[in-house]
Image (tube, rainbow, N blue to C red):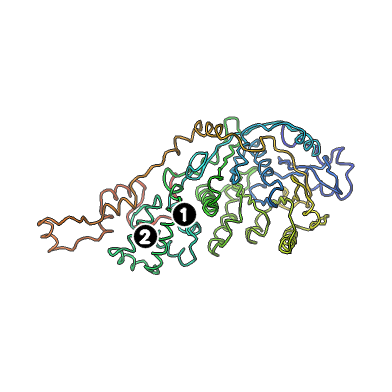
């Protein structure tokens, strides 16, 4: 049974008896093509199952926002949308910050509350699980390890994770530039620390002077930040094998989209790190996907939870890069939903690109809360509701909705009682998750970390030996100057072999993106 068959359509006998204003709102959610069912219209204190509130499948690459106070039902909304996308053959990425979304892989449990909600919204509820893969950043927690190399993560995102200021961020970019041009691969944090340490050493100061604008003091700050970062246990997130974001675009053998669940409870105390990692995933997808034009359904829908963490204390350049990535990635067929407590958490330039809005209840207890409430109301188009009153009175699992219609015009604002997810509303047992991870076709590809030769090993091997030189060596030195450390690295056979293997030439810099992340060949 398709989603469109699960509720009465506007124009049916049930919707014909709707009050005038409610009928006008309901008519804005009648679509010719496939759509996802969100719930039923709330009007004048009643839930109207004959007035379904829906979102066209074709506009879900036009991005969206799911907002609301803690405990208002945002997580269940993500689960509801993800289920229907999967059923329609669309892969989904979910950032599971609280560990509540793993249940999407298992059928839900029937009960009085589920049946009551289904009856209120006209939903024909059937328990169902959906194909899922479980991931964990750096292997911390339950899931297939997701790692990135330092060079592909790039200086802009890494500077955000290191809490560097704008000047230090620019200087870190120069360190990356130096490593790129000298063929010193930055795979993990010890590689970057080795390059930074070399540039601040006696033998590296000449190289440092050759990089315009990078002072020894700033290089020292970066080195200390990297050392502290490693001491906090961050080294596990960087390395190889690097995660291939194409694995997020898979479908199951039965045609349903795979739901990729990134388990984040183990790194809840590292919010800045996981928010920048999520942005790296988006930037990497943007690099690799071809232009897609207008599609009848997105290639992937990406849910970015705790979105406020990404924007806090962000530099102007960082915000501009996010804005451009969000604006341009829709043409690659990827939809992005930011999930946060209030629209104020998202900069205006980004918020203006989020055409689909699901706003759960807003709590207004303090003057600042009331100010945030008024700001939230101003982000919505004119409506038939008193939104300030409505948003403070919504119950759990209710939301104010406006989406883009099939023509790209926004639908009327609709207070909505949302449907119940059909999968398990809660986490699966960790032992069950571990079995699923070990049984995944991706497990053997990513489970074991690999530490191959890169900048750290090359710089360590190139250090002059402390033993006394042989007479023959002394004789040579009388007639020619000893090559510099970097020259020794660049001239080495290992380096030349590596350069050939990655299809680059000595002295050619890696192409970097809006975030400074490196393009990689797949």
Q: CA distance from mark 2 to mark 1?
A: 18 Å
Q: Nearer the viewer, residue 489 or 24?
A: 489
Q: Position of residue 343 (x, y in %)?
A: 68, 57
Q: Which residue is mark 1?
A: 517
Q: Nearer the viewer, residue 200 or 82?
A: 200
Q: Nearer the viewer, residue 323 or 314?
A: 314
Q: Helix, strand or loop at disc 2?
A: helix
Could you tell me which residue is drawn at 30 percent across and 54 percent down? Answer: 459
Task: Quarter of the image for the N terminus: give it.
Answer: top right
Determine crowd level at label 2: few under 14, some 14-19, many 20+ residues with C-alpha closer than 10 A: many
Q: Which residue is mark 2?
A: 196
- The disc label shown at residue 171, or none: none
Q: Position of residue 450 (x, y in %)?
A: 38, 42
User: With 151 as the anchor, is 325 left or right in this view?
Assistant: right
Q: Helix, strand or loop at disc 1?
A: loop
In this rendering, the label closer to the viewer, 2 or 1: 2
User: With 90 as the anchor, is 232 left or right in this view?
Assistant: left
User: With 267 as the anchor, is 171 left or right in this view?
Assistant: left
Could you tell me which residue is drawn at 30 percent across and 52 percent down? Answer: 458
Determine crowd level at label 1: few under 14, some 14-19, many 20+ residues with C-alpha closer than 10 A: many
Comes first in the chain, label 2 or label 1: 2
Considering only vertical position in the picture, is 462 above or below 120? Answer: below
Q: Position of residue 463 (x, y in %)?
A: 25, 56
Q: Position of residue 157 (x, y in %)?
A: 49, 56
User: Residue 484's quadrant in the figure?
Assistant: bottom left
Could you tell me which residue is drawn at 52 percent across and 39 percent down? Answer: 142
């Amino acid at each position: 049974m398709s989603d469109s068959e699960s509720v009465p359509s506007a124009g049916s006998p049930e919707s014909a008896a709707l009050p005038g204003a409610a009928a006008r709102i309901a008519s804005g959610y009648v679509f010719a093509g496939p759509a996802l069912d969100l719930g039923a219209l709330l009007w004048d204190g009643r839930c109207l199952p004959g007035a379904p509130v829906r979102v066209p499948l074709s506009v879900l690459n036009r991005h969206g926002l799911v907002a609301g106070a803690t405990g208002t039902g945002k997580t269940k909304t993500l689960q509801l949308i993800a289920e229907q996308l999967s059923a329609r053959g669309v892969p989904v990425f979910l950032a599971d910050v609280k560990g509540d979304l793993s249940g999407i892989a298992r059928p839900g449990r029937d009960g009085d509350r589920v049946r009551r909600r289904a009856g209120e919204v006209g939903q024909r509820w059937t328990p169902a699980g959906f194909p899922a893969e479980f991931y964990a950043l750096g292997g911390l927690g339950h899931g297939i390890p997701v790692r990135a190399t330092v060079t592909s993560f790039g200086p802009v995102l890494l500077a955000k994770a290191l809490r560097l200021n704008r000047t230090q961020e620019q200087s870190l970019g120069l360190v990356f530039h130096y490593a790129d041009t000298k063929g010193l691969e930055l795979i993990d944090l010890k590689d970057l620390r080795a390059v930074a340490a070399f540039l601040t050493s006696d033998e590296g100061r000449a190289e440092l002077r050759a990089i315009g604008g990078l002072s020894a003091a700033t290089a020292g700050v970066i080195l200390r930040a990297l050392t502290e970062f490693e001491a906090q246990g961050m080294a596990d997130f960087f390395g190889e094998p690097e995660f291939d974001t194409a694995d997020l675009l898979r479908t199951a053998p039965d045609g349903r989209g795979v739901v990729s669940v990134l388990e984040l409870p183990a790194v809840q105390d590292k919010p800045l790190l996981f928010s920048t990692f999520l942005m790296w995933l988006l930037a990497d997808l943007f690099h690799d996907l071809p232009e897609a034009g207008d599609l009848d359904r997105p290639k992937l829908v990406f849910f970015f939870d705790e979105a406020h963490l990404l924007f806090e204390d962000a530099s102007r350049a960082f915000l501009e890069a996010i804005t451009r990535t969000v604006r341009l990635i829709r043409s690659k067929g990827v939809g992005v939903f930011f999930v946060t407590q209030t629209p104020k958490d998202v900069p205006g330039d980004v918020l203006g690109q989020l055409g689909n809005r699901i706003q759960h209840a807003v709590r207004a207890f303090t003057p600042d809360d009331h100010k945030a409430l008024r700001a939230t109301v101003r982000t919505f188009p004119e409506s038939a509701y008193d939104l300030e009153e409505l948003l403070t009175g919504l119950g759990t699992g209710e939301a104010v909705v406006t989406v883009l219609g099939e023509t790209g015009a926004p639908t009327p604002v609709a207070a909505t009682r949302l449907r119940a997810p059909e999968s398990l509303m809660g986490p699966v047992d960790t032992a069950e998750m571990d079995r699923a991870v070990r049984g995944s076709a991706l497990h053997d590809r990513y489970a074991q970390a690999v530490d191959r030769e890169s900048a750290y090993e090359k710089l360590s091997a190139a250090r002059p030996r402390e033993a006394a030189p042989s007479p023959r060596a002394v004789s040579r030195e009388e007639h020619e100057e000893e090559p510099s450390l970097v020259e020794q690295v660049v001239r080495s056979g290992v380096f030349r072999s590596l350069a050939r293997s990655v299809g680059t030439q000595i002295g050619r810099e890696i192409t970097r993106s809006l975030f400074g992340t490196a393009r990689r060949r797949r």
